[in-house]
Each structure stands twice: as C-alpha cells, then as structure tokens.
Amino acid sequence: MNRKKRLLTGILCMALCLTAGTAWAAQGQGTVSENNGQTDIMAGVVVDYMGKLRFEVYKEGTTTPIEEASVELYIPSRDRYILLGLTNSNGALELDVSYNPSADLAAQFLNADGTLAFQGTLLYLNSNEIQYQVYKSGWLPYPYQGTEVLIINQDTQVITVYLYKKSTGGGGGSTSSGGSSSGNSGGSSRDDLFDPNDGEVPLPDLNEGEKTGGIPKTGVEGAVPYWFASAVFFLVAGGIFGFLWKKEQDIKKRERRYWGEKNT
Amino acid sequence: MMQRKSSYRSKLAVLALLFLLIGMFLAGMGLQKYIVNQEIRNSYKNSSLIWKQEMAEGMDAEEARDLRNRQLVNSMNYVSMEQIYFDSADSFGEARISNGGESAFGCTVTLIRDATGEEIYQSDIIEPGHYIESILLAGSLKRGYYPCTAIFSFYTANDEYVGETARKTVVVIKH
C-alpha cells in the first residue's frame, strides 16, 4: 500500500512539475533559447535568428592578447558605430548577433490597417554582413575597421583582429575569421589576409552625442584666420586713412604757404 | 580740378571706412570663436567626467576615449535587462530594466529591432537605483521572437552626456 502511495505521489509530483514548467514558460518567465545561431520556429510565429560572435584581438604576428580594446558595431539606423564592449584579459569579447532570416521582413511590422509602419535601414546588411571597428590607444590601425558575413548555424563565429604598436611602424593591421570557437587565432601571415583598412578613418568626436565638437587644445582654433583677415583689412584701411591724412596735410601746408605769400 | 580731387578723396575715405568695418566684423567673428572655445574648454575643466577633465589638462584624445569606454562598460555592469515579454504588441510588457544604485550615471534605453532597424521603444532617464517595470512598444509587431539592440545612453546627474553602449536583447510577443 505504502509502495503504491509513494508511486502515485511520485507520478503526481512529476505531472505537477511538468504542468508548472509549461505554464511558467507560457507565462514568459522562461528563457528562449538563442544558442548555436538558430531558434525554434513555431508555426505562425515570426522568428529572427541569433547567434554568437566572438572578437579576438592580438598583437600582430603573435598570440599575445590585447586587453581592453574597444569593439564597436555599426548601427545603420543611428548611422554610427556603437560600443559593444571591451576585450577581456584573453583579448576576447563575445557578443550576441542577429541574422537575417531571409523572410519577408517588411511584412512583420505593420500598422493596424495593414500598411507598412517603417521603412528603415537594417541593422545588418541583406547579405548578413556586419561592419565593426576595433581600437585601442597606442595601437594601429586606429581604428581597425572591417566587415564580416555572418554565417547561420555556426556555434560561435570568430573574428580575429591583429593590431600593432604605434612605435613599430608597419602597414595596416589584419584580420581573419573562423567558423568555430577554435577560430583562426593566429599563425596566418598578414600578407595572405584581406585587409579592408587601407587607410585610417578618424573616429568621430568624443562628444558625438552632444554634437558640440571636440575640445579646442589652445582656445584660439578657428579664431586665428578671422583675426588674420581682419588685420589685413585694418592695414589696408589704415593705409588709405594715412594716405588721405598726408594729402590733407599737404593741402593745408600749401594753403598756409599761399596765404603767407599773399600777406607778405 | 579741386572739386574732382575732393570727390576722389571722399571715395577713398568711404572705401577705407568699408575696409575698417569689414575688419571689425572679422575681428568680432574671431573673438566670438575664441569665446566659444573658452566656454568649451571651461565645460571640460568643470565637467564631472574624469576623461573630460583629463582632456582639458592635455590628455590625448585616444587615451581619453579608452578612459571613457572603460567608464561606460563599467556603467553597463550596473544595468540589468532581460528578455522582454508582451502578451500582445499593443499591451504593456514586463521589462524589468534597472539601473543599479551603485551606478554613477543615469541612462536612457532605446530598443531597436535588428531585422528592420526600427526604434520600437525609447525610455526617459532611469536614475541610479531606479527601474522600469513595464513598457509599451511603438508600432504593432506580430506574434513572434524579435532580437533587438538595446542602446543605453548615459548621463551624469547634471544631464551631461557621457556616451552610449549597446547590448542585445530579445522581445517576445506571445499573442
């Protein structure tokens, strides 16, 4: 009897757990899986894809990690790069990224009357290509900019970036990418690698959000050309006034001489 | 003859006066630029942000940017944001967006749907130690699972802009 009761209790407990778990997930308290670059597609439900992207930043030609390098992704709707994080002591930063599910994206965002509510730019490009930049003071290129095509169904996509110290000179950094967590972290010759960053692109001003411009180093930036031009105009005006004054003096001198001769 | 000379001198005097006025205008423009520059420099000096103070003292912009980014990433550690669930697109969803009490900055949150780039939510400033419990989305998303980028813009207590960082999140519309 006791055995029967225990069995029945056990079955009831399991059933309760299953019911509670389902209800809990249905209430939205559970988490939605976003592992391995894919998500479950349920009938009639719109699903965008997410995956992992890992940046690894190393000193050029070595596997020496560069810590606290800034990693930024380009957000087209903001038309600028935005900081996602800094690399850790292993020179790595792992991010979640979204993939284009190649579905009819526009149809997913509709007004109540069925008209399209938004016609903006994609966070990623249609080809699943993202734009990124990596930089750290004292290292070149500053910033390193690159693009990467996101591949669906990869465990973790790795982008390896190589930077070099300012003092050592050299070309323009390099990058490589790998489709797994093992990645392609080093050993590749920079000559073999695609380098999208032929020239350095200056980073926007630090106060970009305020649109105030950078700090003037000396305080007279921008003022000097105006002052120079004004000095030229003052000189010319002064020259003309001087010329007129001299003429005036000559006339007066002549008049005085004329009246003097007349009086004598 | 004398009258012609006098007219010539008058024209020259007018020209000189014109040059003088242009010179004064340009000098004024330069002075205005100088005053604006000084105001910006003073705003950096008096800023509560270390990287701005350091820049006013002559710190290199690259180093200042690193310093600012470290500050921003540190601030992100205090921000908490989970997946956001909505019963439907036009109902309030449980957001649980909080800015920890230890955070040095207030922040605003903007949600951008990755697939389309549209802005689906923009919050007011969340002061340190405060949180937003529920939010209402703009537009009308269908039932689904939407990866989004949450952009956090940070501000000091004096509403001075610090910078922005982004994080991925997911919006789930249940019905």
Image: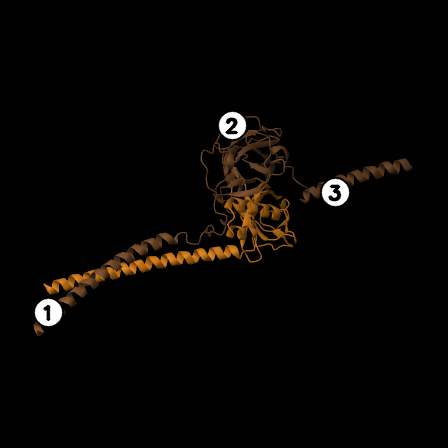
Q: Residue at x 77, y 40 (%)?
A: A17
Q: Chain of mark 3?
A: A
Q: Name the tint of chain A in the rendering.
A: brown
Q: Residues within 10 Å of mark 3 (few under 14, many from 20)?
A: few
Disc 1 marks which amino acid? Tyr
Q: Residues within 10 Å of mark 2 (few under 14, many from 20)?
A: some
* Quadrant in which residue B106 is drawn: bottom right
Q: Are marks 2 and 1 in contact (CB under 8 Å)?
A: no
Q: Name the tint of chain B in the rendering.
A: orange
Q: Secondary structure at mark 1?
A: helix
In the image, which is nearer the foreground, mark 2 or mark 1? 1
Disc 3 marks which amino acid? Ala
Q: Is residue B45 left or right of residue B135?
A: left
Give above or below for A258 relative to A96. Answer: below
In x, y percent, where is residue A25?
69, 42
In x, y percent, where is residue B58?
50, 50
Give above or below for A242 relative to A148. Answer: below
The numbered disc on residue A190 is 2
The residue under label 1 is A258
Give above or below for A66 relative to B118. Answer: above
The residue under label 3 is A20
**Residue farthest to the right, as pictured:** A1
- Asked whether the viewer can see residue B157, the reply is yes
Q: Chain of mark 1?
A: A
- Asked whether the viewer can see residue A48, the reply is no
**Residue farthest to the bottom, as pictured:** A263
